[in-house]
Every structure is written in C-alpha cells, then in structure tokens.
Amino acid sequence: MHRQDIQTIVNAACETADSIVGAREWDMAEDASAMHDLIFWDMIGKKLPDISVADVLSILGRSA
C-alpha cells in the first residue's frame, strides 16, 4: 500500500473520530481524548489490518 493511501485512511479515521467525539458533550477532556484515540485506532486496525501501529507511525514520519 502506498504512503498516500495510508495517509488518506488516517485522515478519514481522524475526521470520523473528530465527528463522533464532537457530537457529544464530555465531562472531562481526558475522556473525550481517550474515546477519540479508541475510535481512531479501531478504524485504523479495521482498514489496515496487516500494518502495525509502529509501521503506520513510521510511514507517516512520527515516532511511537
């Protein structure tokens, strides 16, 4: 899979998590952040099942 394809999937997962988390009122920012991360990584795992988190971060130029 090309880097641009992975970047597109990452962007879509982030936008989806933003929309879901933003649609609800949260008591604590930490809860909202944790839910965002959970939704984001769940979507990444479903769309990129054969790529590890470390590989995704490496492809995107971020460190784990």
Image (cartoon, rainbow, N blue to C red):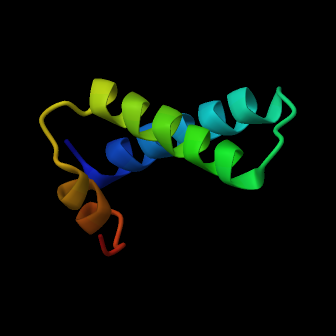
Image location of residue 40, percent across then percent down: 49, 38
Task: Say which of 1 and 12 sits in front.
Answer: 12
> Which quadrant does the C terminus fall into?
bottom left
> Which quadrant does the N terminus fall into?
top left
Image location of residue 24, percent across then percent down: 83, 27
Left or right for 1, reference 6: left
Left or right for 36, reference 64: right
Image location of residue 14, percent across then percent down: 57, 42
Q: Quadrant of residue 17?
A: top right
**Residue at the image position 59 percent from the left and 41 percent from the top:** 36
**Residue at the image position 87 percent from the left and 33 percent from the top:** 25
Task: Say which of 34 and 53 sits in front.
Answer: 34
**Residue at the image position 47 percent from the left and 37 percent from the top:** 38
Left or right for 63, reference 28: left
Kindly give the residue lying farthest to the left in the view shown. Answer: 50
Image location of residue 61, percent across then percent down: 34, 73
Above-or-below relation of 20 to 53: above
